[in-house]
Amino acid sequence: MKNRFTILGCGSSLGSPWITNYWGKSNSKNKKNLRTRCCAHFQYKDISVLIDTSPDIKQQIIRNKIKNIDAVIYTHEHADQTSGIFELRPYFWMNKKKLDIYASSKTMKELKEKYDFVFKQKHGYIPIGKANVIKDKFFISKGKTKIQIEAIEVPHGMIKSTGLILNKIAYLSDCSSIPRKLEKSLTHLDYLIIDCLRNKPHPSHLNLEGALDAAKRLGPKKTILTNLHVDLDYSLLKKKLPSNIIPAFDGMSFTF
């Protein structure tokens, strides 16, 4: 089995289109502008890992034919990254073991408060998740297989978000800046997947100018722009970007 990274969803918090069928400046006829909320998955040998559980996680998993989930890593506590967590119950029933849930101490605290049924018995329901607090480097293991992941803390407006680095891939779906002190960890990348909300500045996210500046500073082989707002049309964006920087689309994947 090839190691594969998949962008399950690349849309901003309301997706594209919005529930009101608002497409903004995106061409509704282009399927690559149909964006579910930010979420990703990677398969490393026999380990299957989700990054966040968006409100659209059920259709994302079915559409990408993901058969099993061993662990989930959360980047932060916002609803567009966490509210699909209740969909994970069938994996607990299928595997007859708790899923490993990884998050920073702050995010884990929020998860336990908002989704307490995942971690402790409630109203007769058995908990389905095991909490693992992460900081710096950590490992996810399954049998004899083990993968090392580095967690880095990046600003996301008023809070901090966890960026992830594995096998020369960095996933920074929600960030408003890249502190200089993190540049050493983010160089020599094959793929930089980075927040790029819209053209105008935003207090909690990188805009296009900020994302391009980060890509220039860090110099990855390939940059993929995610967390795309309805104001960013896939085709128009792709036309004005250099060949090594591309907008994401739901289901985009690559091997590593």
Image (cartoon, rainbow, N blue to C red):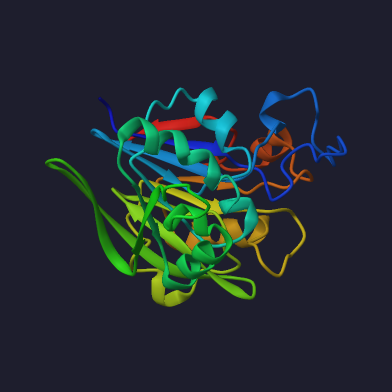
Q: Quadrant of the N terminus?
A: top left
Q: Is residue 138 left or right of residue 195?
A: left
Residue situated in front as seen by the camera: 198 or 114: 114
Residue situated in front as seen by the camera: 239 or 106: 106
Location of residue 233 by image quarter: top right
Q: Residue furthest left?
A: 144
Q: Is residue 173 left or right of residue 129?
A: right
Location of residue 121 by image quarter: bottom left
Percent from the top left, x then y, of residue 220? 41, 51
Q: Is residue 42 above or below residue 122?
A: above
Location of residue 185 by image quarter: bottom left
Asked whether residue 244 is in view, the answer is: no
Residue situated in front as seen by the camera: 74 or 231: 74
Q: Is residue 14 left or right of residue 212?
A: right
Q: Residue furthest front?
A: 124
Q: Is residue 113 above or below residue 67?
A: below
Residue at the image position 73 percent from the left and 65 percent from the top: 202
Q: Is residue 186 above or below residue 181?
A: above
Percent from the top left, x then y, of residue 3? 29, 33
Residue at the image position 62 percent from the left and 43 percent from the top: 241
Percent from the top left, x then y, of residue 29? 79, 22
Residue at the image position 60 percent from the left and 42 percent from the top: 10
Q: Is residue 1 left or right of residue 205?
A: left
Residue at the image position 30 percent from the left and 42 percent from the top: 97
Residue situated in front as seen by the camera: 191 or 21: 21
Q: Quadrant of the C terminus?
A: top left
Q: Is residue 25 above or below residue 131?
A: above
Percent from the top left, x then y, of residue 136? 31, 69
